[in-house]
Structures are given as structure tokens and as C-alpha cells.
Amino acid sequence: MLTAIIDYESGNLHSAEKAFQRMAHEMDAGEVVVTSDADVVARADRLVLPGDGAFPACATELRGHKGIYDAMVEAVEQKGRPFLGICVGMQLMATTGHEYSETPGIGWIGGDVVKITPTDGSLKVPHMGWNNLVIDNDHAIFDGIKSGDHTYFVHSYQFQVRNAAERLAHVEYGGDVTAVIGRDTMVGMQFHPEKSQDVGLRMIGNFLRWTP
């Protein structure tokens, strides 16, 4: 089995690469590679799309790597390959991003990415640090995970999901903030699983064994 972490020049992928490689080794789950090669993306069994920075810049970079983008879309939409979006990689699954300017997302999960506006004025933005997951809908990604488990966040914008069934988990931060989304063969995490210690590693392992 080959898992491809897509490199489209939008973030430091070293820690994600090491975490996925560690779990793949422990689970005998095949090879994990970081790649900017469209042919590798096309033949991969699983795809991971990270992302750091602003939504418009990440969207522009991803679409600017046309071969990678087209191979990824075909793999997910036509071949049904399991897909994981992380941080801005999750946000790019949305219909539209509203950071700085209105920017089209991939459109896999209906919704908008908007500024976090906590009802509690003492809460700072960005939402940074550990927070407790609240699981909204059962999913294989949560095997061995329960509400109250901690994951690590760094973000100023949140994914407002239109279909409640596609919001798998949230956290409380002056209101609900989407933490995990998913449908069909796609899942996304707003937090960084590679920085979320045992809980994050468990979820990476769950993705590597997931057979939707």
C-alpha cells in the first residue's frame, strides 16, 4: 500500500511525514512518501493533503500544480481513494473560503471557511493549543478515540459545514468550532494529528487502516 502526502509548496511536511511513516511501520501499512509527482499521486492507495497558511494562497498553489491537482481529484472522485485533509488541507475541501477574499475550494464538503469569532471576548484568535474533541457522528477515524480527548490546533478560520451529518467532531471555543469532517472516502482534521501525541497518532493509524 502506498500513502502519498501531497507536496504543493504549502507547508513544512517533515513532522507529518515522520508521524505517518512511524504509524505505517508499526501497522505494516506499506510505504509513505511525500511527493510533488502527479504520477505518484495517481497511483497512490491513500492521499493526504496538508496545508499551512492562508486559504487563498494554499488554493492558488494547489491549483497551480495542475498535474497534482487533477490527479488528486481523479483519485478521490473517480477511483474512491481514501483522502485525508489536514488543517488548511481540510479547509480546502469546502465550497468557499472567506479569508482575505472569496476563494473557491474543491467543493467536496458543502460549507464555508470563515473567521473564528468567539462569543467570549477573552478568547484569543488564532485558536492555538490543546482542546477537547466532542464527537458528533461515529466514524472509523475515531476507533479508540472518545469525546474529551485532546488534539492540537493552530488556526484563525473555521469550517462551517452545511450538512450536520458531515461534521464528525467539534471543539468548544466561544462556540462550536469544527474539528473533523467527512463523507464517503474523505475525511478532514482541522487540528494537526502529527502534533497531537498519542491521540493524533491513533487517528493517523485509523486512517491508514480505514477501508471505506
Image (spheres, rainbow, N blue to C red):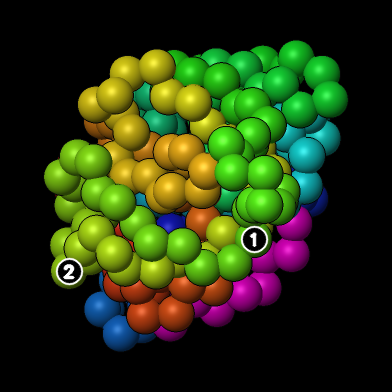
Q: Does the magenta stretch include residue 14?
A: yes
Q: Is 1 left or right of 64, judged from the image as shown?
A: left
Q: What amino acid type should be assigned to the residue bearing mark 2?
A: Gly
Q: Which mark, residue 144? A: 2
Left or right, 19 with respect to 14, comes to: left
Report the residue marked by disc 1. Answer: 128
Secondary structure predominantly adopted by residues drawn in magenta: helix
Residue type pointed to by label 1: Met
> Is residue 81 among what the camera can see?
no
Q: Between 144 and 177, which is closer to the camera in this rendering?
A: 177
Residue 106 placement, left or right of 82: right
Q: What stretch is highlighted in magenta?
A: 11-22
Q: Where is residue 160 in the image (x, y as percent from the top left)?
A: 49, 26
Report the residue at 35% width, 57% height from top: 133
The residue depicted at 64 percent of the width and 27 percent of the height is 114
| Image: 146 above or below 18 | above
Secondary structure beneath disc 2? loop
Nearer the observer, 173 or 114: 173
Residue 66 rendering spot, x and y as whole percentages: 71, 28
Tell me the quarter of the image containing the N terminus.
Answer: bottom left
Q: Is 131 placed above or below 73 here?
A: below
| The quadrant where residue 18 appears | bottom right
The numbered mark, 1 or 2, whose residue comes first in the sequence reads: 1
Q: Can residue 174 be seen in this view?
A: yes
Q: Where is residue 122 in the image (x, y as percent from the top left)?
A: 67, 52
Between residues 14 and 182, which one lies in front from this camera angle?
A: 182
